[in-house]
Amino acid sequence: MALQNAFEHEGETRDKIILGKILGTKPEFRTKVKEISKDISEIVANVNSLSIDEQEKEIKEKFPEILIPKEKIEQREGLPELKDVIQGKVVTRFPPEPNGYPHIGHAKAAIINSEYAKMYDGKFILRMDDTNPEAERMEYHAAIKVGLEWLGIKFDKIKSTSDDMQIFYDKGIELINSGKAYICTCKREDISKNRRERKACKCSMGDIDKNNKNWTKMQEKFKPGDAIVRFRGDMKADNAVMRDPVLFRIIEGKHYTLGERYRIWPSYDFAVAIEDSIDGVTHAFRSKEFELRKELIDTILDALGMRKPYQGFFSRLEFKGMPISKRIIKPLIEEGKVSWYDDPRLPTLEALRRRGIKPEAIRKFIMSLGLTKANTLAPFDALEAFNRKFVDGDSKRLFMVKDAKKITVKNLTMSFVEVSNHPVNEMGKRRIEIDENFYISGDDVQNIQEGEQIRLLGLSNVLITKKGEEIIGECVNDEESAQIPKIQWVSQKNAHQIKLIIPKTLFNGDEFNENSLEELDVYTEPHYLELKEGEEVQFVRFGYCRKDSQNQAIFTHK
RNA sequence: GCUCCUAUAGUGUAGUCCGGUUAAGCAUUUUGGCUUCUCAAGCCAAAGACUCGGGUUCAAAUCCCGAUGGGAGCACCA
């Protein structure tokens, strides 16, 4: 073993390492550390005194099997295993609030939860968490469903938290009657002050009868803000969430599906606790900012004698320079700095889709982040790398010329050329009609000199005879082409002009990047018009782009 | 301010629970090479990390204590 280790490390080994290896493989020696240490020292000294060649010879003679290269450790696929799970009995859920457009953060929660259900052949529930009538809207509800569908996430059940209003009321009354909840009519500021100072208020002393009466009054008499139902937690608790949190409050706004049927609405903590329990959720994964609610949720369920799910947490996901929160995005839209929630600079699902990011790439990317609780501020190119792998294989290669310069090529013998759509995959060819007039990119023009050759890809070598405002060249024999620059071109007579949008980082630090959207007028081949809308192409020597419309493409990534 | 979470290469992570079999694995990035009628993809190679300080132990990325950096919560939002 010492020999092997020495050989693998340039002819030298160390006692400690060998000792560790032995103890690691053969635990029975662990009690005899002192004794074997001596032997090891000797062996190690022996081995180290040999030259590397001698070591190799020795190994070949005595232990040829260790020269066989070790197999690579297999990388775990997917999420970490869960403890104490029963195959087929796992239930997870994704509970978005329909109060905004879904973004990459929603994708993370949805994907992690649905992957676990899939992994254990369980069930996955989509639950619209709609207990704040003032915030929810059908538009968002629909957008979330569209987004999830695009991501390819399937659920076994769709429901809304508000389906179970009666259950919340029943459970609420149960808590009131058991003295575990009370109605508080203090002012909002006082409540918050008492929480900070860890003091109970007089309402918490009220008896059950009074609480019941006040509960009735909450149905009609009390105005919003006059009274709330509070859980009897622990006003002295270090975890501020436990300091008699709100269970119900009065909201008079019109709910997007239930209208004005209810005016007492459960709070998030109460609703989630009850819902997860009655929906049979076994594992609930949420982002880290909810971590402190775990204790509360468990306590509420204990107070009601209800089953508790396992709760797990993961870090929030954001991209560098791409804000996720409505608080930041909304003003940008209002000021016209971004066009809408589908602006390709945004991390919303709709924007990602428009930009040409594939759902599979998002899934892989999110899986690669794992269940870490460390903050993840990923650079966008991590996602791009995954996306490239999905997109490369079936993106047609098209020519596109930016900062177009004219070039005339003499002696051309053909009037059309056939170019293949993909260098390795069989994706057919396209035919391009040509005459002697072409466009090539300004960048390329800068790099060529009179008397030099260039190769127009798929066409011919061209000798540059004159370089001025316009360029003149002549067709020369195809031969050696390895050394000459190969560039893409567009035929002038059928060039199709499009707008190419290049999204860049929206923010540099806290500062809005005024140049975050570059728009270029470029020429591409007529074949562009035949592409389906939304199709991903690669503009040769430029990068992957998605056809947004007949006249506009969006740059995906290099 | 109080409470909680977190810390591994440029970046993102695995390993940490149960200390040794891994002088830290993978992906990405970067750099070189091969291949190629694209600056793409593919293939090969190289570079690069356990936040710091103590302690326990024959042995610490792993356990304990402390410091520091980052984040979150302290709503009648979710």
Image (cartoon, rainbow, N blue to C red):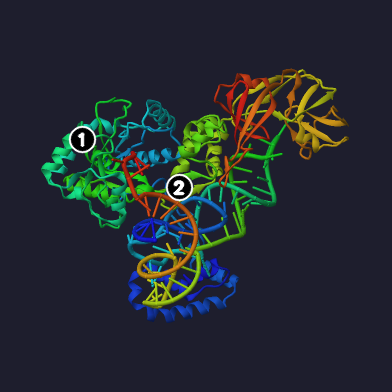
Q: Nearer the viewer, residue A70 or A73?
A: A73
Q: Residue at x 32, y 38 (%)?
A: A93
Circle 2 sits on which residue? A369
In-image side of A399 versus A444 (left or right): left
Q: Give the image quarter of residue A518.
A: top right
Q: Earlier in the sequence, mark 1 or mark 2?
A: 1
Q: Are marks 1 and 2 in contact (CB under 8 Å)?
A: no
Circle 1 sits on which residue? A218
Q: Can marks 1 and 2 be said to lie on one chain? A: yes
- The amino acid beneath tag 1 is Met
In-image side of A190 versus A528 (left or right): left
Q: Residue at x 33, y 76 (%)?
A: A31
- Numbered disc 1: secondary structure: helix
Q: Residue at x 35, y 44 (%)?
A: A286
Q: Nearer the viewer, residue A40 or A373?
A: A373
Q: Nearer the viewer, residue A46 or A299?
A: A299
Residue A147 screen position, x and y as percent: 43, 31
Is A19 placed above or below A402 here?
Answer: below
Q: Nearer the viewer, residue A514 or A213?
A: A213
Q: Give the image quarter of residue A226.
A: top left
Q: Is residue A64 visible?
A: no
Residue A38 screen position, x and y as percent: 43, 82
Is A319 placed above or below A408 here?
Answer: below
- The amino acid beneath tag 2 is Leu
- Numbered disc 2: secondary structure: helix
What label does residue A331 carry, if any? none
Count neighbours of disc 2 (C-alpha within 10 A) and say few if under 14, some if 14 to 19, many if 20 or more: some
How many marks can you see? 2
Q: Is residue A286 visible?
A: yes
